[in-house]
Image (cartoon, rainbow, N blue to C red):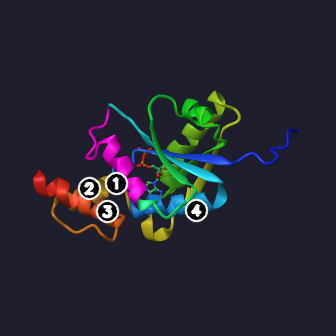
Amino acid sequence: MEIAGNSKKIAVYPGSFDPITNGHMDILKRAAALFDQVIVAVLHNPNKNPLFSVEERMNLISEATKDYDNVAVDSFMGLLVEYVSMKSASAIIRGLREISDFENELRMAHMNRHLNSSCVTVFIPTNNAYSYLSSSLVKEVASHGRDVTEFVPSAVAKAMHEKYRKA
Ligand code: ADP
């Protein structure tokens, strides 16, 4: 068996992050404590109609993670396992909120392992306080003019308020 030696342990945390929430931040904080480097990778998904562009999402994540020295922000399109290999990462981070998340996540983890046998998916359960949070629910609340500062990093709450004020 090959011993990894001193090689850096890099993990990719992929997602839509439209926008990043305190639930995502909780997972990221835990992942950053487990790996030498975590790359938050925003997916370019042409099938979704996002509130924030990929660039806006990346800027909001960079702002929210500016105090973490081992977190980088990037974007990708296409197959996640190819992006993971390109970055020489050894793990994919996914957050779990409830059992229903797990079904789909496990299927994706099996497929990714099949496509790249060296790639490990690490599931991190969310803090209970955030188990009901999703980007889409936060957008729904903000779109009706309610304050969302308790659910998202402060720069995100401000950016959402601006978006919906203009809409
Ligand atoms: P995707 O479109 O890939 O599901 P998301 O931005 O919705 O993108 O989610 C990215 C990752 O963050 C997923 O692993 C998801 O389960 C996790 N996640 C989303 N919301 C929360 C939350 N409130 N607590 C913990 N993990 C979360």
Question: Residue 33: image x %, image y %?
Answer: 63, 62
Q: Do the residues labelled 4 and 1 touch (CB within 8 Å)?
A: no
Task: Give residue 152's quadrant in the image.
Answer: bottom left
Q: Mark 2 points at which residue?
A: 139
Amino acid type indicated by mark 1: Ser
Residue that numbered label 3 is attached to: 155
User: Regarding mark 1 in the picture, which secondary structure is present there?
Assistant: helix
**Which amino acid type is shown beneath numbered disc 2?**
Lys
The reply to whether dot 2 and dot 1 touch (C-beta < 8 Å) is: yes
- Judge depth for marks 4 and 1 and give the one in front: 4
Q: Considering only order in the chain, which callout, 1 or 3, is on the residue closer to the N terminus?
A: 1
**Residue 74 appears in the figure:** yes
The region drawn magenta spans: 47-63
Residue at left 32%, top 32%? 47
Please state which amino acid type lies under the numbered disc 3. Answer: Ala
Please say if 79 is above or below 144. Answer: above
The residue at label 1 has a CB less than 8 Å from ligand 1? yes
Say what amino acid the circle numbered 4 marks. Arg
Q: Which mark is residue 30?
A: 4
Q: Residues within 10 Å of mark 1 (few under 14, many from 20)?
A: some
